[in-house]
Image (tube, rainbow, N blue to C red):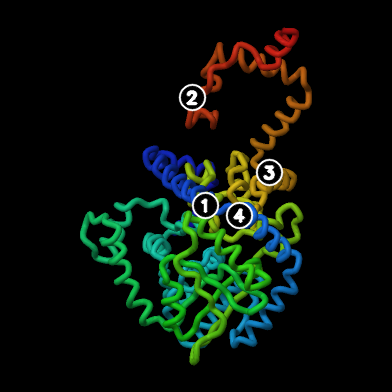
Amino acid sequence: MSKTVMEHADASEVFNRDEPYVNWHDETLWFVRQKRDKSSKQLPEWEQLREAASGIKHYVLSHLDELLISFEQKAKENGVQVHWAANAAEHNEIVLGLLKKHKIDKMVKSKSMLTEECHMNEFLQKNGIEVIDTDLGERIVQLRNEPPSHIVLPAIHLKKKDIGDLFHEHLGTEAGATDPQYLTEAARQHLRDKFLTRRAALTGVNFAVAETGSFVVSTNEGNADMGAHLADIHIACMGFEKIIPKQEHLGVFLRLLARSATGQPITTYSSHFKKPREGQEMHIVIVDNGRSTQLGRKDFRNSLKCIRCGACMNTCPVYRRSGGHSYHNAVAGPIGSILAPNLDMTKNADLPFASTLCGSCSNVCPVKIDIHDQLYKWRQVLAKEGHVPKSKEIGIRAMSTVLAAPRFYQWSGRLGRTVMRAMPFMVNNTLNPWYKQRDMPEPPEESFRDWYVRNRKN
């Protein structure tokens, strides 16, 4: 995996060089968004569910200390060993320590965005541990030595031909094969041996229930079950915001999660784990990694309500036409753009600007996170903290001066229209980012204000 980090605008420009491919990517994600719309409209109580989920999560964020302590106590009573990690490094060391303790050097893993956030795979591999991702999409991008481009659909950026070529190289399938059933069967046979021979399995956690000390893992492939039920040691990793108060609250979130993500009524497998089977060890690693800081940011704490459905990505016009890898972060799209600056403002200062602020992300969020408002607020924070390019800072200051003086604004508008008519090359050039992807519009003869003043009496 390349460690070179390109800013979103530059990476998007590279992604957009293949226009037919970008159009396909855009249409595919919009198709998923449409499935979400159709599925949600089948529930008359959809908006009540969203409101309930948002309210439950609001309670969680206000009572995290109590809920986490309760969860730990119940989990321990169930025979589960609980570990706490302040950051990504501690999380990785805990997982490595558990594997070394049991002399395990091979592990299967189901989807976990937290481990992507912590760069766990690379860390374990450097320490002699083979990690096999068993989610089909995750395994595909792992074989390509690249990160997921989407939190629910990790390989959404690839076409059937790309996967056929990859499987031919790594799994020995027929050259040129693109039939999904054939390729899926090849992956199933490839992974079956991994499940049967690995003594350790790692899963993520979709929801952890404080009342019972249990947790739920939602998948469509059953790979989390296969790994956890066959392994001698099951390690579950979760960000501390995944906690919910009671078992009865699960129904609210499970009805929202899959419908928002892929348009399904519910995920194929909603697996409930409470205690290890006889002879098995079960461990839960609860991770902070910047979440406490985000919790303390009044304007941004609601981002911790996220249930990782990916709906905001599927609807976002910028994400759909720039690709997940352009966000250079484990979680891409609108939600990633408000989570990432909390971890590293300098590295991720570009991401809150990768948005039109259209509000579509907030409209589809199942837990009603004010995503577009937070994107706007992050821009303000980043500008005040000096994390924007000098050219952008100068431009913003210039526009502030113009917009603060009505007569100067009117004069500037007339000058701009005159220049665009008389010397179009002044704006139709590659120095103008807008012009790179589209033609500049024809300048109007007069501004709306001038037209209004001239016609107001009529």
Q: Which residue is mark 3?
A: 376
Q: Amino acid at mark 1?
A: Gln
* Badge 1 vs badge 4, beta-carbon distance below 8 Å: no
First reached walking from the N terminus: tag 1 or tag 3: 1
**Count of numbered circles in the view:** 4
Q: Single out the residue that lies furthest toward the left.
A: 174
Q: Is residue 452 left or right of residue 236?
A: right
| Residue drawn at (49%, 92%) of the image | 279
Q: Which residue is mark 1?
A: 42
Does dot 2 land on a helix, a strand or a loop?
Answer: loop
Label 3 Cα neighbours within 10 Å, binned few <14 / some 14-19 / many ≥20: some
| Residue drawn at (74%, 30%) of the image | 400
Q: Which residue is mark 2?
A: 439
Does dot 1 land on a helix, a strand or a loop?
Answer: loop
x, y percent for residue 146: 43, 59
Choose top left, top right, bottom left or bottom right for residue 53.
bottom right
x, y percent for residue 71: 67, 78
First reached walking from the N terminus: tag 4 or tag 2: 4
